[in-house]
Amino acid sequence: KMSQCAAKLKVSPLEAYRAFHGTDASLRSGYTHLFGGLKPGVDRAAAVELRRLCRTGIHTTQTSGVAPGFVQANFVMLPKEYAFDFLLFALRNPKACPILAVTNPGDPCPHNVAPGADVTKDIPKYRVWRDGELSEECTDVSHLWTDCMVGFLLGCSFSWEGKLSLLGLSPRHIDQACTVPMYRSNIRNNPVGPFAGDLVVSMRPYTPDGAIKAAHITGCYPGAHGGPIHWGDPKKLGIEDLDEAEWGNTVDVHEGEVPCFWACGVTPQTAIQEARLPLAVTHAPGHMFVCDVTDDELFVATDPDHSFGR
Amino acid sequence: KMSQCAAKLKVSPLEAYRAFHGTDASLRSGYTHLFGGLKPGVDRAAAVELRRLCRTGIHTTQTSGVAPGFVQANFVMLPKEYAFDFLLFALRNPKACPILAVTNPGDPCPHNVAPGADVTKDIPKYRVWRDGELSEECTDVSHLWTDCMVGFLLGCSFSWEGKLSLLGLSPRHIDQACTVPMYRSNIRNNPVGPFAGDLVVSMRPYTPDGAIKAAHITGCYPGAHGGPIHWGDPKKLGIEDLDEAEWGNTVDVHEGEVPCFWACGVTPQTAIQEARLPLAVTHAPGHMFVCDVTDDELFVATDPDHSFGR
């Protein structure tokens, strides 16, 4: 049945993605030239307040559903000597690692997405990695910040999940009140220096019509993973069993639906673990950095044909 | 008369540019998510052949007019320890430094724009800078390339000058068979690490109607400086006398025309000189790297309102 459903769709974007992916032709950032920055006249108090609660140790739990409408971001912090390789890794793997902000070395404020913020204090929970092993979790890493550290904020699919729900395309894991299922794919990331690893994908099932609509919508958020990279047979991504999610929870795929796969923000985290840097910091899963940027500001009108597989 | 002409235009994009520019909101690359990479079925032999002639020491002169239709790029090569700061500098100053390619450390091939090329051999003439001073000019810098060097290719306005000419908007310096006039502006680049300096601008005069058309066309080439950053009074850019170009030649501005200013690829070169790195290499002026990418492939359809000042 899955193959019948898939046949009603345009051909999967997977092959286009693979072809494009391996060529290094993907140098671009999540912020495109179409991104207009923070517009005046928008009330950003909810994001500022949430970060204040994180900084003062009052909010230490997950950020799902908090400050709705504001962009939530994955966080990576590492020594400057690895920062060039990681920045280039992100630019070369933009579907998985859409760059929203890079701090100046020594300055923990991501001025373009959250003026006044401090990436070492304003996330509810951090993970500290030493030689690729989880060393500790804590709610403040300002003691690890020096002039030699650089912080990165990377886009997250939260930015379009609300939009999908509003349009009647609620992701299944939201209906089932659990975490999106994530899988390690058989696509190797474009490697740079010590950073490599496999592309991690998230899965949301849709009917063929729903998948096309979801692809068009998510393709307008290149700063939040953009459109899906595959739909249909999970084996083409090396996924043997959809019921064996490596991260998150398994969700039901109903009759008449096809699984749809998006590049996932866990990708850079696994790349960082595998790089075994002497020191690196990430956010704890689900404990994201909340930006002043709204999800709407991350939207860029895009020709649907451009969003497939890129 | 100039002020009357300027009044017929929309308001200059300069203030929007300044506002956007200082905020670090400009993180993005010349390659946007809309750039599709090298398409199959295009004959790229002219670019490949030109690079072969450079590599073998047969072509050692300027590249203006050679391999027409192919993207020509500014070149920068520097030690990896400065590569993060320079890459971030380019991302933070994308109008002046639209990134087309970054080589992997140690690999002199810019795979995404010229498979098979070698940036250390395929440019007709290089300039070697030591401590910010011109040390020598040569036609091959492969002896300076090590695993610790990184090469950058940055877009160039050549990509749209031909298109402007085709549409009856021939830049004046082309009609006068000279080099475009370039001026140091009073806009400081967004600094990163040792890289700072002033934005350098190129000037082309147009009637108000011509300027609007030229802005719309060039705005569709974010990988080649995009749309103009100012038109009208040169003093707003700190330029006292248009007849005193710091680089290139002075051109005539006819009655009924306004000077129009674009961000210029000399900007990164001055930033690199001022950074006084122990070693850096650039192309010699006018001796560009010729890519396999066609000018048409660098075109991305853009809402004109997005191209102004960004």
Image (tube, coloured by chain):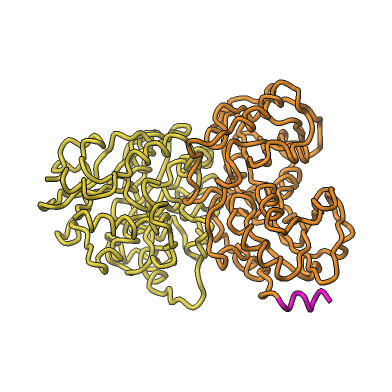
Chain colours: A yellow, B orange
| In-front residue for pair A297/A249 | A297
Residue B195 in magenta? no
Along the line of sight, the residue nearer the viewer: B52 or B286: B52
- Between A4 and B84, the residue placed more toward the observer is A4
Determine if residue B89 is in view: no
Image coordinates of residue B166 in percent, x first then y, are 69, 53
Q: Residue at x 26, y 67 (%)?
A: A167
Task: Name above or below for residue A226 compared with residue A292.
Answer: above
Q: Which residues are magenta?
A: B1-8
In front: A243, or A116? A243
Task: Residue at 20%, 48% (x, y): give it.
Answer: A259
* Residue at the image position 79 percent from the left and 32 percent from the top: B61
Height in image: B263 above or below B56?
A: below
State left or right for residue B34 relative to residue B98: left
Please report the residue visible at 10 percent of the width from the left and 52 percent of the height from the top: A255
Quadrant of residue A229 within the rendered picture: top left
Residue B93 shows in the view: yes
Q: In the picture provided, is B148 more to the left or to the right than A288?
A: right
Depicted B294 relative to depicted A154: above or below = above
Please provide percent x and percent y for residue A60.
Answer: 30, 61
Magenta-colored stretch includes residue B6: yes
